[in-house]
Amino acid sequence: MAPTSGARPTTRRSTTRSCTRTSPPTWTASTTAGTAGPTWPTATRPRQNFSLWDTYRPQNQLLEVLAPDVARDSYLSVLAIGREGGWLPRWALVSSETNIMTGDPVTPFLVEGWSKGFLAGHEAEAYALLKQNATEQPPADSQYNGRSGQHYYEKLGYIPFGLRVGTECVSHGGDNDCAHPASATMEYAAADASLAIMAKGLGHATDASMLTERSGWYKNLWDAGTQSFRPRMSDGTWLDPYDPVEASHAFHEGGSYQYQWLAPQDPAGLVKLMGGRATTEKRLDDFFAYDKLLTDPAGTARTDWIEATYAYYSKPTYNPNNEPDLLAPYMYAWVQQPAKIATVARAAFTLFTDGADGMTGNDDLGTMSAWYVFSSWGLYPTMSGANSFVVSSPQFERVDIDVASPTSVRTGQGGRLTITAPGVSDDRRYVQTLAVNGSKSTKSWVGWDALRQGGTIAHSVGTTPSRWGTTPADVPPSAVQTSRDPRLSLSMTARPTPVVVPTGAREARLSVDVVGQAPKSLPVQVEVAAPHGWSAAVGGSGDGAVVLHSNGVPASASVPVTLELPSGLGAGTHEVRVTASAPGVDPVTKVVTVQVQEALTCVAGAPGCAVDLAPACNHDGTATVSAPSDGNFDSSGWSYDAALLPMGTTWDWNGVTYAAPVTSGTTPNFVEGRGQTILVPAASRSAVHVIGSTHNGDVSTALRLTYTDGSVQSVPISLTDWAAGSGHNGNQVAIAMDHRIRGG
């Protein structure tokens, strides 16, 4: 434990309880007849229940300091699981593998242990298992998923969105990397960086070079156009439509905002990728709602940060309830603003109390409590295997930490580490000066070598930020210097697809979106082949040329295309062939459909624009008591009662006028979504109002509106199941019925 002083008793109790929660229970596995999975020799009896996706950041680092024999035992237990089970685990539980969570957490977990000497005598075995895990996939009869996206990651530099788990990606149950490909890509890259450190340290230079290159592949998902990490498809194009908050669950238990800081191997490169120091600082401020933290830290943490305990896809802000963005507060050190760490950390501290529920979210076998303990000391380990800590002000005036010396292995550690900050408080939280082992330091970080045998970290603090840690020389190191991805690639898509114009139109417009990657720049040529009698103007200058300034990361550009249509063109479907080409890569060709159709109209005389959907209706969802088989709303024979639906041409509800569909007979009266495009009148409007419902569960999607002037708008929409009884997702019930009609 670590005795503390200089804070409220409740704060000291909160820290003590958090420290207690970081100690794992002693669960061991043994040979049991008739059980599935690997069995263990009696002498081995490895520890079990390793939720490695959680604990590799930073629970195992805390065990190394406070309980090194437990840490050593845990590392060797994971090795035993890999040795006896044939593959390294992701989440080992009761002599079996659960495959819970995604990415490659076992690699940073074990590399961390190796880097501090806890794998002494087992280095070769550990490296062989780790390299196997990082470059291969488990045998077909294995219970382990391993890196299920490894083949795609190795070929493309990322795991594409939309892969089918169980067919395109091997699955042995549990979670799967291909179901959350964006976060898995970023976690593979971070794991590769850890393994590169180990490979270099063991003299495997070729492996180290390969892994170092791969550690920069997190950049392959950076979309400079949206300034976000964004899933890519197998052809290299971006997932579209895309909402970085919900992110189509391409990130596991978080969205693009929470995962944007998951590059612990290369924070300096991440800052550069995001546009530099000032831009990234602003990005961090927005992420933490920093201005609000200055006046109401506890309230901001509970309202701006947190939606609910397990609400992972609801906000573009910090989520202190889960692991993906645990490093985020400490990113301020890399933008030369370490003072802001103290403000963010203290807001998060308010979520930890001495009560029964005194922790954030699910403690995940001590991980969230370990974050609190380290942060309350004013230290945070940045990356597994890097052996450095970002420094901030501690929560206490004095902390005495017994850096324990393990009895089972020599790691060179052991001694009393004393951290002091006289007068520190929530108001006096800004570091003014720092001394490490008696020597003044302006750096916002400290290495493990300075702490492993104990020592002192002495802060002076004040009520306003100082110049401490604010120069480029003070920034913490990035563990791996990632290089440019040397691959050449080109992909292309066209939007909208299809292109829909009204009859009589003389032009149609589309955009050709190209995504390219090259070590430097990539010149791209876009050409359009249109039907006879048509003409095409490609690009702003008409020549279809565009240069993508890639520099090793994806670069995008949109090339506008205007098609001139012949007069008298009636309703029908036509094809336009679009080709993008660049030196050194195969050309990409897409066929774009151009539909000429009659536009829907507004009901004459109705206020606003009550769109008459009758020409687009394709499904009869109403019936009557006398003719119960006329409709079939849910494809199982059930329908709305036509007698209880609005009659007439229009219907007013909640101040909005709608066109009322025909409900008699078998005339279609619903527009069932089948991927079709509906052409609506163009006008300047402030809102779109929709009456609709679903069956077999609520549906959230994007409604893509195509207007008669050629413009296209994507509108998020959520519809409530017709049997729900109340509106979900912000919907209101417009028509309520106490019964439905069953066909037959």
Image (cartoon, rainbow, N blue to C red):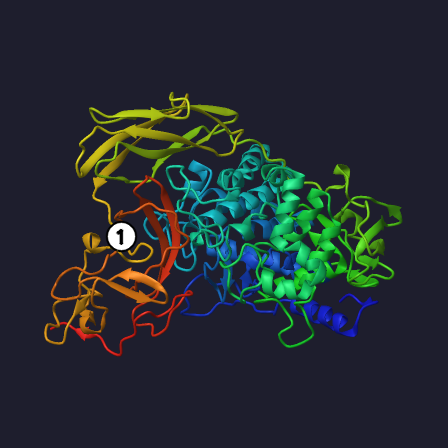
Amino acid type of the residue tagged 1 in the rendering: Cys
Residue 239 or 718: which is nearer the viewer? Answer: 718
Residue at the extreme bottom: 738
> Between 733 and 240, which is closer to the camera in this rendering?
733
Residue at 37 percent across and 65 percent down: it is 655
- Residue 366 in sight from this viewpoint: no
Give the quadrant of the C terminus.
Answer: bottom left
**Relative image position of residue 369 (x, y in whole percent):** 65, 65
In the image, taking residue 724 as reference, residue 354 lies left or right, namely right
Residue 557 position (above or below residue 525): below
What percent of the width, then of the height, locates residue 443?
A: 79, 44
Name the residue rendered at 72%, 57% in the picture: 343
Q: Indicate the quadrant where residue 377 lies.
A: bottom right
Q: Quadrant of residue 580?
A: top left
In percent of width and height, residue 579 lies at 32, 27
Picture layout, residue 564 above or below residue 372: above
Residue 597 seen anywhere in this rendered image of the structure: yes
**How many neighbours does mark 1 have within 10 angstroms: few (below 14), some (14-19), or many (20 or more)?**
some
Total number of numbered discs in the rendering: 1
Front position in the image: 60 or 189: 189
What residue is drawn where x is 44% and y is 48%? Answer: 181
**Residue under the image location 50 percent in, 51 percent down:** 103
Name the element at disc 1.
Answer: loop
Residue sitting at the far right: 438
**Residue position for label 1:** 602
Residue 482 in percent (x, y) is at 59, 35
Image quadrant occupied by the N terminus:
bottom right
